[in-house]
Amino acid sequence: MITAERKPLDEILKLVGDQKKVLVAGCDTCVAICLTGGEKEAEILASELRILAEKDGRAVEVEHTAAIRQCEWEYLDMIAGKVAAADLVLSMACGIGIQSMAEKFAPKIVVPAVNTNMLGMPQEHAVWLERCGACGECVIGETAGICPVVRCSKSLMNGPCGGSHDGKCEVTTPEKEDLDCAWALIWDRLKAQGREEMMFVNRPPKNWSKSSSGGPRKMVREEAKPV
Amino acid sequence: MTATEYKAGSNLEKVLSSGRFAVTGECGPPKGADVTVIEEKAKILKGYVDAVNITDNQTAVVRVCSMASGYTAQQNGLEAIMQMTCRDRNRLAMQADILGAATLGLKNILCLTGDHMSFGNHPEAKGVHDLDSLNLIKMYKDMRDEKKFQCGEEMTVAPPLYIGCAENPFADPFELRALRLKKKIEAGADFVQTQCIFNVPKFKLWMEEVRALGLHKEIKILAGITPLKGVGGARYMQKFVPGIDVPQDIVDRMAACEKGAPSQAEGKKIAVEMIKEFTEIEGVAGVHIMAIEWEIAVPEIVEAAGLMPRPAVA
Amino acid sequence: MAEPAAVVEETAEAPKKPVDPTFEPEIIVFACHYCAYAAADLAGSMRLQYPSNIRMIKLPCTGKLEVIHLLRAIEAGADGVYAAGCLEGECHYLKGNLWARKRVNHVKDLLAELGIEPERVEMYNMSSAMGAKFAEVATEFTQRIKELGPNPVKREGVSPHAAAREALGGVAMPEDPQEASAAATVEEGLAE
């Protein structure tokens, strides 16, 4: 799923500026599952903003709402009334939802309350690990189902580098404590699959034009377009 | 072997091709637009090493670039091995730089992935990692041998290159380490310099695997050596530097010496002992002495190891 | 050696904010009905004295308490809020009180971010047999809040107790009749 983390309050306040009517808009899909930007979290942020306004003696109205999915036009219609009544929308959706909102309700000011950070997997409750870089050309068929693009700190196509130690990556900052070496994982799984020879193939340079390096991407499915 | 048969015709290539035990050194460029540092280091090492590695933003810390510093070294009579990391350049820059380096007379290149940005002084930098070191080796080989850019397009004049790589026999998984060297040979590496060795038995074990695969016949292997200045450095590397294996007996030997001259002498002595041991290992074609900010120790070590005079190869 | 001692002394004697003797804080207590709520009853029957500043909301378990419930009470002007759950390891629902502690701690962080004293929220643990402990906690916490002074967020005509109950929706359990009537009396008193 897409994961996001809430921005620091100071940054949110700067983005809100001196707007008087603020709508905190959560999204009840990915960001709700990662406990960052669902209706619950939107309600908490709205309450925080009201507490702060009251404490500082500022007349600000803060409401909250949530769309089932901020990234789809149809669901945005459902909150259009509340958006219309606000001077500014503080969106807690992922970057896609925030932009859909900004586009749908342009020129309404829509600002993010979260930092979208990864395509992650909930490894355990409240712990997410990055699993996909949306690089546009999946290689995990050759790498035992483990993505070297985002799970190797150096995106090696031919790992492991000399910094692999006891199955761990040399990049082990406090935030990345105990980071597994993707290539050690790949090797272990290839062995378990009896496909060791796949480790010894020289993989050519990756075609990054399929990734965001190639410019903004567009996908069209002609056969699925409405008639 | 005649001159025309050389891939690049560098001094290093000639020494290694002649079968003589090679010695390479290492110089880190300074953190400022100062040409004198490399000039000074070159003066110290000249005549004692066959070529010198010029590091490329080592440990992800910005310094004078390896191309300019390599050029300075060569202007001062010391052949350079220009290091190139995949961290800082994409394939366009890597190819442009190697063409530029070739026009400046640089012939030896060492292809590296590079230390991660998080270790350096710009941890907020975007890591490029367009290619990995294997892709880089292959790209340079194709430029040299096929006269082709990575995209397949032909170039006007191919750069004469002697292509090196690095390998760390002490990284994990150990069972992959010799096999990974094989991949680098297949990609086109002509020589390999290893991570600095302190654990000689483990290095010998790696060399056994290398010989079992016949790799020592396909690539020139230079064993990495870092002379220790004191016990502090030994302990630091033992505990904190990933991929370096410093056995306790080395630390103990350094700890038994007083700080300053006695422990420096012991560090040099250990280095000399190791070099002598490496000359006896089948398949080791030379040593790579990385005296980090201690270049002055190199002439003494090379001399004591009986590796002087350095061969003058035509 | 004299210098550090002097520093210690100074710290110990650091002047506190003068306590306003007329300030009667409004304190919301989220009490688990298996323990703290029963402990309050016991305190009553033991005729133990504790401040009338506390207003209780009965929960089936403090594990039902969410971040927003605590925030709503603060937003509505409560000067202090605490949750009182079972002793750790004795939760009727196994871990509800441990969850409550985590949430209370999170609210402390949020308050700090807002520039409001995190000490205004707290988590306590007690058993139903601890009438004295209940009175002691109520007394101590009330004193703490008196020292902190009023919540900077004060809203005229808003009842923190009602706001917290509303935020809890169906989660809050009905109050015992005597508690309800006592509450009504207090509310009337406040209204006057």
Image (cartoon, rainbow, N blue to C red):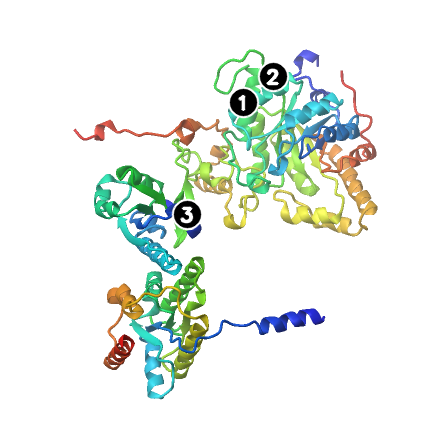
Q: CA distance from mark 3 to mark 1?
A: 48 Å
Q: Which residue is mark 2?
A: B159
Q: SS for tag 2?
A: loop
Image coordinates of residue A136 in percent, x first then y, are 38, 31
Q: Pointer 3 and pointer 1: residues touching (CB < 8 Å)?
A: no
Tell me if mark 3 has few (under 14), some (14-19) or many (20+) residues whose alpha carbon lies within 10 angstroms of its own: few
Same subunit, tags 2 and 1: yes
Q: Residue at x 35, y 30 (%)?
A: A217
Among the 4 quarters of the image, the one containing residue B42: top right
Tell me if mark 2 has few (under 14), some (14-19) or many (20+) residues whose alpha carbon lies within 10 angstroms of its own: many
Q: Which residue is mark 3?
A: A14
Report the mark closest to the observer, 3 or 2: 3
Q: Which residue is mark 1?
A: B139
Give the quadrant of the N terminus of chain A: top left
Image coordinates of residue A190 in percent, x first then y, are 46, 39
Q: Nearer the viewer, residue C41 or C26?
A: C26
Residue B23 seen in the figure: no
Tell me if mark 1 has few (under 14), some (14-19) or many (20+) residues whose alpha carbon lies within 10 angstroms of its own: many
Q: Chain of mark 3?
A: A
Q: Amino acid at mark 2?
A: Pro
Query: Does residue C54 appear to the left or right of C181 in the view shown?
Result: right
Q: Chain of mark 1?
A: B
